[in-house]
Image (cartoon, rainbow, N blue to C red):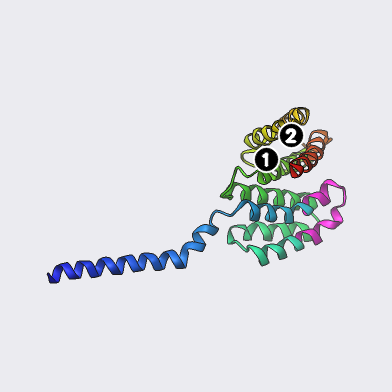
Amino acid sequence: MTHQRDRRRIGWITGILALVRLLLWGDVFAASTPSARSTIAFCENLEPVVEAVTDGRPGRVPAAAHTAVVWWRAHDADTLYAAGMRKLLDHADSHRAPLAAGVAVGLCAVAMERCGEPRDVGLDVMRLDVTGMAAWLRSKGVVSESPVGAAEATQRVSAKLRASHREALAVRLEQEVAAALAVPARASGPTPAADRLLQTVDVVEEVLKKK
């Protein structure tokens, strides 16, 4: 009987410890797969760095980079991004605007790949926006990979557009994503494919908001 009581006591203690671990560490485990909302916010705060470059205003990059880092420290501060954030500031403060933009795109791509809601429509639209930014930078010789899952995101967004009777826009989006993904890195060149996709994504975003 004593051994049975000891086993029951051990079982109770084990169960209590498991509950304590869940209560103490549950938020940490949840944070390891960020929500679509937090991922989109993270990317939105990095976008001005890239847009300053694509809009031909590199002088705005340092301020945009510092604003993004301040936001990250206040809202996220995930150590996974620490090295990238340091590199972002280093390029921005050294007036290497295209390289800073490349780092910003890379950080967005990593964040989207980690997101726990990869099929969220808002995240899909953001993924396509970053795909256009990456293509623009590659056109200028900056190494910038497109986000993982861009093709699949295109299919999902196009399906939603067709459900809203926007067939022409869906076809246009599919064609422009394909063209942007095919843009190679070059020393210097025009950016029509990237520009068209970025403009189309803005239209898509407005259409889906009205849905």
Q: In terms of depth relative to the viewer, which is nearer, 174 or 93?
A: 174
Instruction: Place residue 34 in its image quadrant.
Output: bottom right
Q: Is residue 160 visible?
A: yes
Q: In terms of depth relative to the viewer, which is nearer, 146 or 115?
A: 115
The spot of residue 26 in percent (x, y) is: 48, 62
The reply to whether the C-beta atoms of the residues labelled 2 and 1 are less than 8 Å apart is yes
Secondary-structure class at tag 2: helix
Q: Is residue 139 above or below residue 108?
A: above
Spatial distance from mark 2 to mark 1, Cα to Cα? 9 Å
Q: Left of 149 or right of it: where is 174?
A: right
- The quadrant in which the C terminus is found is top right
Q: Is residue 161 above or below residue 109?
A: above
The spot of residue 44 in percent (x, y) is: 73, 53
Task: Give the number of the disc on residue 102.
Answer: none
Task: Please state the extent of the stretch shown in magenta in the rendering.
Answer: 49-65
Mark 2 belongs to which amino acid?
A: Ala
Task: Give the number of the disc on residue 146.
Answer: 1
Q: Is residue 24 above or below residue 152?
A: below
Q: Is residue 193 above or below residue 25?
A: above
Q: Main secondary structure of the magenta part?
A: helix
Asked if the magenta segment contains residue 57, the reply would be: yes
Please name the residue that numbered disc 2 is placed on.
180
Q: Earlier in the sequence, mark 2 or mark 1?
A: 1
Q: In terms of depth relative to the viewer, which is nearer, 14 or 146?
A: 14
Instruction: Place residue 73 in its image quadrant.
Output: bottom right
- The quadrant in which the N terminus is found is bottom left
Q: Residue at x 69, y 57 (%)?
A: 87
